[in-house]
Image (cartoon, rainbow, N blue to C red):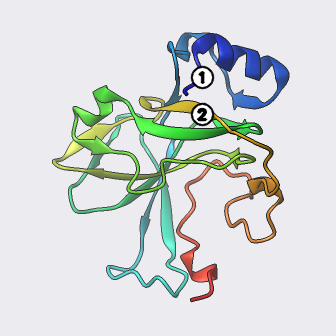
């Protein structure tokens, strides 16, 4: 079951969903549109290693936009900071974004109850495309949770993405034990 617009508004009123900045015009019938922040990043190494800390270089999208290139993984970030305390948020691309050949997440479309941060986007494209800071990039949908949650993301000892940021965050896979 997906929350409707009126339920999303109700949950915002209760504080179980937080969206900053929030603008009513971006609330759809069952989703909330999020926008591309001004910060992008790319990995410095050509070959990434899951057991090592792969560093990234940050840069800002200029006013005239930035042309994404196929074959490059870009890390982006949402303008919106969100908190979700009683629901599971899913981030999906907008159809208009997809129709430009832009994917906004490789595998990380689901958030956790207790996730409190901006969303890092794993952006790729099928052909060169110019993007702009502030453009609609995706939409959040919310699913209710059945039962109590014992281990919320923002209180987990091993949570890797809890530091509040306005910039994209690289993979922290290297912090796992394997």
* Residue at the (70%, 15%) spot, across then down: 9
Q: Nearer the viewer, residue 132 or 84?
A: 84
The front one of 13 and 25 is 13
Across and down, in percent, residue 87 comes to: 68, 36
Question: Do we see residue 37 in this rendering?
Answer: no
* Residue 56 rendering spot, x and y as whole percentages: 49, 69
Quadrant that contains the N terminus: top right
Secondary element type, mark 2: strand
Q: Are marks 1 and 2 in contact (CB under 8 Å)?
A: yes
Residue for point 67% across, 61% down: 161
Name the image quarter holding the C terminus: bottom right
Left/right of residue 91 with respect to residue 126 in the rendered view: right
- The local crowd at label 2, few if under 14, some if 14 to 19, many if 20 or more residues have their Cα within 10 Å, is some
Residue furthest to the front:
147
Q: Residue 100: x, y in percent?
A: 22, 34
Residue 151 visible to an observer of this rendering = yes
| Closest to the observer, 68 or 100 | 100
Q: Is residue 10 above or below residue 76?
A: above
In percent of the image, x 68 and y 67: which residue is there?
160
The residue tagged with tag 1: helix, strand or loop?
Answer: loop
User: Dot 1: within a 10 Å radius of its alpha carbon, few (fewer than 14), some, or many (20 or more) residues?
Assistant: some
Mark 2 lies on residue: 143
Left or right: where 157 falls relative to 73:
right
Separation of marks 1 and 2 at Cα, in angstroms:
6 Å
- Work out whether mark 1 precedes mark 2 in sequence or the reverse, and give the earlier one: 1
Above or below, 110 against 171 in this view is: above
On residue 3, the disc is 1
């Amino acid at each position: 079951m997906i929350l409707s617009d009126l339920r999303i508004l109700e949950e915002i009123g209760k504080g179980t969903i937080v969206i900053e900045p929030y603008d009513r015009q971006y609330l759809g019938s069952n989703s909330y549109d999020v926008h591309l922040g001004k910060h992008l990043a790319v990995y410095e190494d050509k070959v990434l290693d899951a057991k090592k800390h792969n560093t990234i270089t940050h840069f800002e999208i200029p006013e005239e936009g930035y042309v994404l290139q196929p074959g490059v993984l870009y890390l982006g970030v949402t303008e919106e900071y969100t908190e979700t305390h009683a629901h599971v948020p899913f981030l999906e691309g907008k159809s208009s974004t997809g129709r430009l050949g832009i994917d906004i997440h490789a595998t990380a479309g689901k958030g956790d109850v207790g996730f409190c941060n901006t969303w890092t986007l794993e952006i790729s494209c099928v052909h060169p495309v110019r993007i702009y800071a502030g453009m609609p990039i995706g939409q959040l949908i919310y699913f209710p949770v059945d039962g109590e949650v014992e281990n919320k993301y923002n209180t987990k000892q091993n949570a890797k993405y809890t530091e509040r940021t306005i910039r994209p965050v690289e993979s922290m896979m290297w912090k796992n034990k394997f």
